[in-house]
């Protein structure tokens, strides 16, 4: 979901005001009985039919249910309300909607169809609306931090945790699953996404969605597609050659959809090739339905619908978030469009069928989402483990980390480290248990408030070093901070970059923090910088500090996780899901994000592929990450059989600590012809005790070996020799072998078994 409250005041006048009356009315509120959960009224239908037979497939159940529905009931399901009041406007959410929720679609009690209660977002159960009662819940680290773990088990466990909290909070739809590739490092929503590579982003987001949906909660995958900057996000036009799109951004969505089977796809605000994504038939029908075979429903982002018949006929199934659109397009206007024949009854049936099919397929009918207790203690362990797994040790000169017991004077500086850890802003914001640790920072309104989860790194550092003197300075005075640093055995600077929905950010730390780090590093070379950022930042001070730990936005238990990593209780194992550039001059488009057409002339050459193709040395490479132990990899072999490529190798922990490595396989045709010298073909997270080894086998998806033939509408693998590279990062190739592949073509509908 995406909100634009500040930019467009919700004063419902004209068509929008009258449309609230014309839209399907919600049912009367069901009063709870103290002490016991009450099944909602829809769970006791007036009539029953074949759709209640759980032995039937979701398709057959959906077909039977839609056949029994009236037109009014069908229209009810394709139109969604915002779930939160705006006291300063004329809009009041339906009484059945959960206060502070993102969205609501009324139940149809006659047929036993449950209401859809929708919540943001990818890191936990969010709360919307300034006047709403804040729903305090557990927050995962940012999605980019989950991607940085390169660990599918971590992604799945995190998704299962937030899905459980959603279901136990009364929600059966979660607006999670951001897959858009990181093309623009200054995009304010990069922290919500999965990085720059289609295989990594598609795989990691898919596992999170699978985890969410294991709780009988529908998850979306979003924002479809090319939602790569916040500047001019409502009308900006993304322009990219279709063949390049297929092997980059669209492939990330395709892999995520195939692996997760999400109940819904959320179409984005922006235009694609001049047409808004939510009425773009190439995206919604040609690619998503015909080529990929997606059977769920497409919902709009909040305010992303711009038409009625055009959007419905292009493939939009549910108009979400009334009153954020300029009109309630799928309420009275859709009824009129059906009556005039602009939208056929068969199309309305199809839209409705897709929605209820997902509800059947993901257990929404049989497992009602009812408020009940949440095991917060267990969830704390999940989010802490995720924060630890996703943190990336970027630099560790002379093994400055982990912190030694000999450090008796520790200076902690900046980043509100005495209070908590930073979170990203916008609709995905989860309000923490205990409230905002640093209230009052501007902006306090949308897309704020700027939120700090109350997990103090300073308190955790003191807990790990009971015999040391730990002193804190807020960093507002660089001279005083440098003086404190000069007298310390070790200095830890916490540096922040706040990102959020609706705005883009420079590729820098906030304020004057670069100057602060420079001053502190000059005073004491034993300076550790802990970054709490949503994306990459330039580091002009890098040569002046001893160590850098990228902690991202680390969530509810961020302070504890950071301390565990600094003191070596946990071995760092995260890897960068994006290339860190030295400066904006190294980017494919150094210009500041702008309005109008955004032409992706680099095509599929995204991230590390751009740096490889242009022979540019980045600050830190995609896939880079250090450890407190040492690993070796070797014994690489590659076999091609029946057109498939499989690589096999061994990983060994040669150090003295237990830890996890992330071996990566890259592939490239000897003859060239790709957008870049190589592509990521596979990866694994391998945890090993000291001295232990493990043999790893991984298959390379054939589409990662192919180019897209737009004219022939197919995938094409060129026959010939291919390099298979075993690597520690995109810039650290350890071993290469060559294998010969036959030429082959695959239809657009092809998918890995």
Image: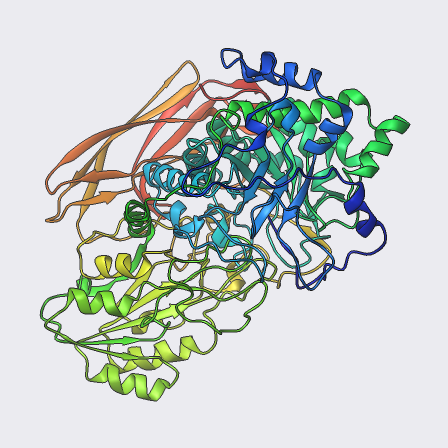
Rendered position, 241 above or below 340: below
Q: Where's residue 562, x and y in %?
A: 28, 60
Rendered position, 136 above or below 368: below
For residue 80, what is the image quadrant? top right
Q: Residue furthest front?
A: 34
Rendered position, 23 above or below 254: below
Q: Where's residue 615, x and y in %?
A: 46, 52
Q: Where's residue 515, x and y in %?
A: 40, 79
The one nearer the camera, 41 or 608, is 41
- For this view, does 730 lie left or right of residue 563? right
For residue 393, what is the image quadrant? bottom left
The one nearer the camera, 7 or 509, is 7
- For this view, does 538 lie left or right of residue 102? left
Q: Residue at x 53, y 73 (%)?
A: 442
Q: Give the mark count.
A: 0
- For this view, does 315 lie left or right of residue 741? right
Q: Residue at x 63, y 17 (%)?
A: 47
Question: What colouring style does the render use?
Answer: rainbow
For residue 662, what is the image quadrant? top left
- For this view, does 622 lie left or right of residue 182? left
Q: Residue furthest right?
A: 340
Q: Residue at x 47, y 72 (%)?
A: 510
Residue 224 visible, this angle: no
Rendered position, 485 above or below 654: below
């Amino acid at each position: 979901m995406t909100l634009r409250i500040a930019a467009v005041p919700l004063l419902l006048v004209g068509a929008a005001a009258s449309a609230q009356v014309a839209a399907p009315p919600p049912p009367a509120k069901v009063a709870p009985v103290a002490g016991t959960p009450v099944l909602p009224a829809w769970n006791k239908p007036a009539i029953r039919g074949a759709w209640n037979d759980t032995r039937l497939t979701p398709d057959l159940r959906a077909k039977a249910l839609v056949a029994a529905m009236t037109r009014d009931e069908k229209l009810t399901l394709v139109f969604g309300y915002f779930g939160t009041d705006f006291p300063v406007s004329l809009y009041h959410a339906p009484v059945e909607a959960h206060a502070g929720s993102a969205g609501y679609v009324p139940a149809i009690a006659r047929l036993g169809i449950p209401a859809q209660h929708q919540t943001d977002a990818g890191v936990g159960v969010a709360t919307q609306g300034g006047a709403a009662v804040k729903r305090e819940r557990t927050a995962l680290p940012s999605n980019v931090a989950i991607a940085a773990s390169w660990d599918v088990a971590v992604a799945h466990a995190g998704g299962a945790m937030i899905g459980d909290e959603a279901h136990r909070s009364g929600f059966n739809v979660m607006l999670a699953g951001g897959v858009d590739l990181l093309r623009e490092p200054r995009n304010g929503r990069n922290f919500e996404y999965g990085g720059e590579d289609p295989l990594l982003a598609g795989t990691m987001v898919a596992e999170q969605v699978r985890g969410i949906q294991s709780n009988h909660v529908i998850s979306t995958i979003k924002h479809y597609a090319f939602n790569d900057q916040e500047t001019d996000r409502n009308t900006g036009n993304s322009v990219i050659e279709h063949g390049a799109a297929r092997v980059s951004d669209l492939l990330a969505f395709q892999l995520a959809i195939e692996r997760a089977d999400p109940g819904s796809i959320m179409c984005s605000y922006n235009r694609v090739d001049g047409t808004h994504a939510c009425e773009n038939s190439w995206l919604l029908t040609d690619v998503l339905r015909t080529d990929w075979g997606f059977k769920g429903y497409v919902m709009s982002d909040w305010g992303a619908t711009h038409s009625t018949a055009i959007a419905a006929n292009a493939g939009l199934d549910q108009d979400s978030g009334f009153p954020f659109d300029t009109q309630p397009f799928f309420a009275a206007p859709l009824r009129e469009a059906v009556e005039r024949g602009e939208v056929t009854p068969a199309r309305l049936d199809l839209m409705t069928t897709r929605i209820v099919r997902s509800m059947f397929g993901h257990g929404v009918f049989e497992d009602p989402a009812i408020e009940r207790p949440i095991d917060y203690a267990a969830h704390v362990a999940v989010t802490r483990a995720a924060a630890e797994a996703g943190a990336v040790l970027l630099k560790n000169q002379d093994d400055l980390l982990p912190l030694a017991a000999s450090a008796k004077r520790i200076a902690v500086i900046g980043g509100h480290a005495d209070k908590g850890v930073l979170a990203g802003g916008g609709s995905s914001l989860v309000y923490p248990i205990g409230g905002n640790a640093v209230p009052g920072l501007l902006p306090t309104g949308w897309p704020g408030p700027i939120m700090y989860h109350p997990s103090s790194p300073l308190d955790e550092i003191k807990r790990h070093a009971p015999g040391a003197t730990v002193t804190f300075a807020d960093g507002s005075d660089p001279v005083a901070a440098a003086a404190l640093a000069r007298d310390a055995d070790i200095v830890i600077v916490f540096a922040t970059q706040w990102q959020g929905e609706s705005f883009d950010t420079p590729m820098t730390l906030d304020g004057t923090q670069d100057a602060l780090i420079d001053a502190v590093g000059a005073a004491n070379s034993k300076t550790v910088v802990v970054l709490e950022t949503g994306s990459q930042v330039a580091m002009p001070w890098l040569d002046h500090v001893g160590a850098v730990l990228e902690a991202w936005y680390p969530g509810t238990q961020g302070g504890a996780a950071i301390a565990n990593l600094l003191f070596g209780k946990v071995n760092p194992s995260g890897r960068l899901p994006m290339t860190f550039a030295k400066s904006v001059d190294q980017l494919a488009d150094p210009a500041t994000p702008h309005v109008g057409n955004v032409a992706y002339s680099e095509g599929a050459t995204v991230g590390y592929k751009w740096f490889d193709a242009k022979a540019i040395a980045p600050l830190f490479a995609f896939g880079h990450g250090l450890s407190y132990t040492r690993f070796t990899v070797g014994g690489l072999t590659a076999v091609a059989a029946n057109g498939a490529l499989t690589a096999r190798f061994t990983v060994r922990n040669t150090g003295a600590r237990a830890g996890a490595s992330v071996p990566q396989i890259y592939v490239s045709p000897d003859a060239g012809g790709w957008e870049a010298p190589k592509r990521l073909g596979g990866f694994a997270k391998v945890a090993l005790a000291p001295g232990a080894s493990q043999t790893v086998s991984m298959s390379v998806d054939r589409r990662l070996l192919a180019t897209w033939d737009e004219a022939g509408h197919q995938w094409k693998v060129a026959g010939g020799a291919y390099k298979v590279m075993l690597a520690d990062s995109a810039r650290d190739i350890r071993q290469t072998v060559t294998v010969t592949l036959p030429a082959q073509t695959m239809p657009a509908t092809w998918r890995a078994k």
